[in-house]
Image: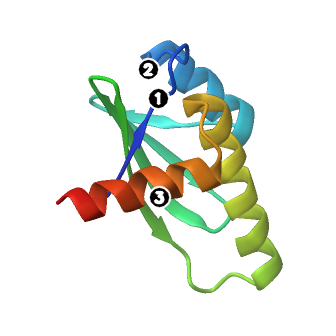
Amino acid sequence: MREYRFKRGFKPTAERLEEMIIKYFGSFEKDGDVYVVRYKALEELRLWLEGKVLKAETRTNPNVDDETALETLRTYNRFLDELTGYTAKERKKHMMKDVEGS
């Protein structure tokens, strides 16, 4: 499971999360408070908000070609960039800091 913080000014609301999911992945299903997305190489992407943190669990399909996997990763990164306000590089830096702090 991954945790993503939101940059100041980027609201962690269910409405915004739904809007971004539809923009980048086209559709979702809901399982309680969890948003379930299926998109290309993502067999299942489970997203939910806990306070000011986005939590994500992914299960990927190992049987997709490299191009589809790369396109899926790019789409996922653009989704996170716009939703959280942090770039992939900034998210990695936060994750490394969290790991070192543990």
Where residue 72 appears, as percent x and y from the top left, is: 71, 62
Where residue 4 appears, as percent x and y from the top left, is: 42, 42
Q: Nearer the viewer, residue 36 or 88?
A: 88
- Mark nearest the camera among 2 and 1 is 1
Mark 3 lies on a secondary structure that is: strand
Q: Are marks 2 and 1 in contact (CB under 8 Å)?
A: yes
Where residue 8 appears, as percent x and y from the top left, is: 50, 18
Q: Which residue is mark 2?
A: 12
Q: CA distance from mark 2 to mark 1?
A: 7 Å
Name the residue: 75% across, 71% down: 70
The earlier-in-sequence mark between 2 and 3 is 2
Q: Which residue is mark 3?
A: 44
What residue type is disc 1 on? Phe
Name the residue: 54% across, 18% down: 10
Can I make out residue 22 in this image? yes
Farthest left residue? 102
Q: CA distance from mark 3 to mark 1?
A: 23 Å
In the figure, 21 relative to 45: above or below? above
Question: For mark 2, does the 10 Å Cα neighbourhood hold few (<14), some (14 to 19), or many (20 or more) residues?
Answer: some
What residue type is disc 3 on? Glu
In the figure, 48 relative to 98: above or below? above
